[in-house]
Amino acid sequence: MSTFPVVRDLVINRERMFAALKKVKAWIPIDGTYDLGPGPRLAESKRQWAYELSKCMTCGVCLESCPNVNDKTTFIGPVAISQVRLFNTHPTGEMNKHERLEALMEDGGIEGRGNSQNCVRSCPKGIPLTTSIAAMNLETTKHLFKKWLSM
């Protein structure tokens, strides 16, 4: 693997990928650890494709195969963009949607992508990464215009 620094035999440093996930806040924050009861339900159609995105095992193969992810760029990669789509879909995660979209709009965010589609071909779980990238490109554009119009 050339994207991730080698630590030793069969061990690589995936900090770049984890830093990208931190940058886009790829989690759903909750207040406290107590039992909050059943969470909000997703519509079946949303649940089915959210399940596809949730299959990601953060292996980093999509980053390795992406020509836009290298030591000369700060592109966060397809895995972080896809996780933004997943967490923005969830009713609880949607509360922080604008923060995630803002992170995608920063330097190294969604503007650094291309359309080689290597990530989809190489993903061992068959996650539709380019579909997520296209959807997040649309969402960031909408967010930008809403922000611009509210000024």
Image (spheres, rainbow, N blue to C red):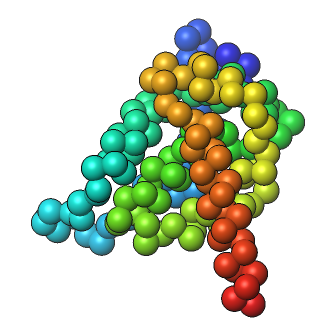
Q: Where 130 falls versus 100 (above or below)? A: above
For the question of whether residue 120 can be seen, the reply is yes
Residue that appears at 53% across and 34% down: 128
Extreme residue toward the right, this view:
72
Q: Which quarter of the picture shows residue 71?
A: top right
Q: Which quarter of the picture shows residue 73?
A: top right
In this orientation, which residue lies closer to the viewer: 32 or 110? 110
Tally of numbered tags = 0
Q: Quadrant of the C terminus?
A: bottom right
In this orientation, which residue lies closer to the viewer: 127 or 68? 127
Residue 75 as seen in the image, left or right of residue 21: right
| Residue 10 coordinates in the image, percent (x, y) | 55, 11
Residue that appears at 40% across and 36% down: 52
Residue 75 as seen in the image, left or right of residue 136: right
For the question of whether residue 54 can be seen, the reply is no
| Residue 66 coordinates in the image, percent (x, y) | 72, 28
| Residue 79 coordinates in the image, percent (x, y) | 57, 39
Extreme residue toward the front, this view:
45
In this orientation, which residue lies closer to the viewer: 12 or 137? 137
Residue that appears at 28% across and 57% down: 42
Residue that appears at 68% across and 44% down: 76
Q: Where 61 falls versus 58 (above or below)? A: above
In this orientation, which residue lies closer to the viewer: 77 or 48? 48
Q: Which quarter of the picture shows residue 33?
A: bottom left
Q: Quadrant of the N terminus?
A: top right
| Residue 45 coordinates in the image, percent (x, y) | 34, 48
Extreme residue toward the top, this view:
9
